[in-house]
């Protein structure tokens, strides 16, 4: 009986981990496709409550990545008429890639995100 519980928990952990990994890939794909970031944040909201605690930190990190990134993109878009917005958009691009790579590395090591509420990396 105990072996079945352990096996079920391992399958749930693997499933949650795969869901978080898909979200990171969707965020990276949003650099080219755009809409996949919206799909990723919806998936993060839906899956975060059922995930193990360490994976919940990844979902929280992903949700904040979407909203903070949207803020950076809007500010960069508005300010692009005066030129500084292009620098903000470039920062947003680097910021998004770094956050996704950081999340994927932690996920591969089965580690939580240390500070999922951070605005930076």
Image (cartoon, helix red, strand yellow):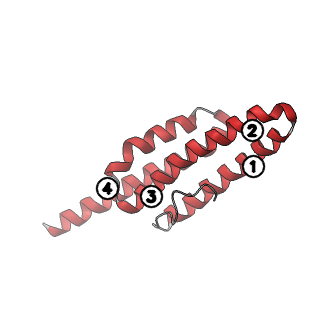
Label 4, residues with CA under 10 Å away: few <14, some 14-19, many ≥20: some
Number of on-image labels = 4
Q: Earlier in the sequence, mark 2 or mark 1?
A: 2
SS for tag 3?
helix
N-terminal-most mark, 2 or 4? 4
Could you give the CA–CA distance between mark 2 and mark 4, rounded to whole angstroms? 39 Å
Read off the residue under disc 1. Answer: 91
Q: Earlier in the sequence, mark 1 or mark 3?
A: 3
Cα distance in 3D space between marks 4 and 3 = 16 Å
Q: Which residue is mark 2?
A: 76
User: How far is the residue under mark 1 from the one under mark 4?
Assistant: 36 Å
Alpha carbon separation for disc pair 2 and 3: 28 Å
Q: Secondary structure at mark 2?
A: helix
Please name the residue that numbered disc 4 is placed on. Answer: 12
Residue 105 higher or lower than 69, as above or below: below
Q: Residue at x 51, y 66 (%)?
A: 114
CA separation, marks 1 and 3?
A: 24 Å
Does label 1 or label 4 sit earlier along the sequence? 4
**Upstream in the sequence, badge 2 or badge 3?**
3
Which residue carries the number 3 mark? 57
Choose mark 2 or mark 4, whichever is in front: 2
């Amino acid at each position: 009986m105990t072996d079945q519980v352990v096996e079920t928990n391992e399958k749930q952990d693997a499933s949650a981990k795969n869901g978080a990994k898909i979200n990171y890939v969707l965020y990276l794909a949003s650099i080219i496709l755009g809409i996949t970031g919206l799909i990723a944040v919806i998936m993060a909201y839906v899956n975060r409550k059922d995930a193990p605690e360490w994976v919940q930190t990844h979902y929280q990190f992903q949700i904040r990545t979407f909203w903070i990134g949207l803020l950076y993109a809007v500010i960069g878009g508005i300010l692009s008429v005066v030129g500084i917005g292009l620098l903000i958009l470039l920062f947003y691009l680097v910021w998004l890639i770094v956050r996704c790579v950081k999340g994927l590395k932690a996920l591969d090591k089965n580690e939580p995100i240390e500070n999922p509420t951070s605005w930076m990396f």
